[in-house]
Image: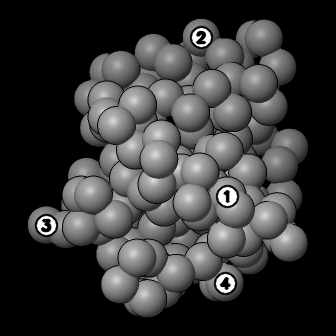
Amino acid sequence: MPSIAVDAGPLVALFKGTDNYHGDAVAFIQSIEGPLVTNLVVISEVVALLSHSFQTAFLGWAIGGALVIDQETAQDLPRIIEIMNKYSDLPADFADASLLAMCERRNIRDVATLDKDFDVYRTADRKRLRNVFFAG
């Protein structure tokens, strides 16, 4: 099964019952077959966006096998800077750029995101990631 990179939006929605996309996030998690891959930058963003009462529940879920947590963000920093500079007009934030760089390095072509900027971002080989969050 191909891996799916997951951005903060669907993860926040999954743990925040009042989020407009909560039902979509639950349905997405129940329907996926491939592993969900993210990095510590995205995890930090999720934790910052969740209330304290949901932070530890999310972290426990994440380390309990629900997510593959990529550990190579430090080696991606030069590429992250390039991405942030290239898309400074959006602007591309650190989390988005780190996720795109991770996808390039791991050859991941599918992303689960609520962020429309991913419709604009292109990989180094000029390909767009396919947003699978709303595909099902």
Disc 3 residue crowd, few under 14, some 14–19, many 20+, Cα 10 Å: few
Q: What's the amino acid at mark 1? A: Met
Question: Which label's residue is closer to the chain start, 1 or 4?
Answer: 1
Alpha carbons under labels 1 and 4: distance apart: 13 Å
Residue 14 vs 126, above or below: the answer is above
Question: Left of 91 or right of it: where is 122?
Answer: left
Quadrant assignment, res 133: bottom right
Q: What's the amino acid at mark 2? A: Thr
Report which residue position mark 2 lands on: 56
Cβ atoms at labels 1 and 2 below 8 Å apart: no
Residue 115 vs 60, above or below: the answer is below
Question: Which label's residue is closer to the chain start, 3 or 1?
Answer: 3
Residue 46, percent from left and from top? 67, 33
Residue 21, percent from left and from top? 75, 60
Q: What's the amino acid at mark 4? A: Val
Report which residue position mark 3 lands on: 1
Q: Residue at x 38, y 53 (%)?
A: 102
Cβ atoms at labels 3 and 1 below 8 Å apart: no
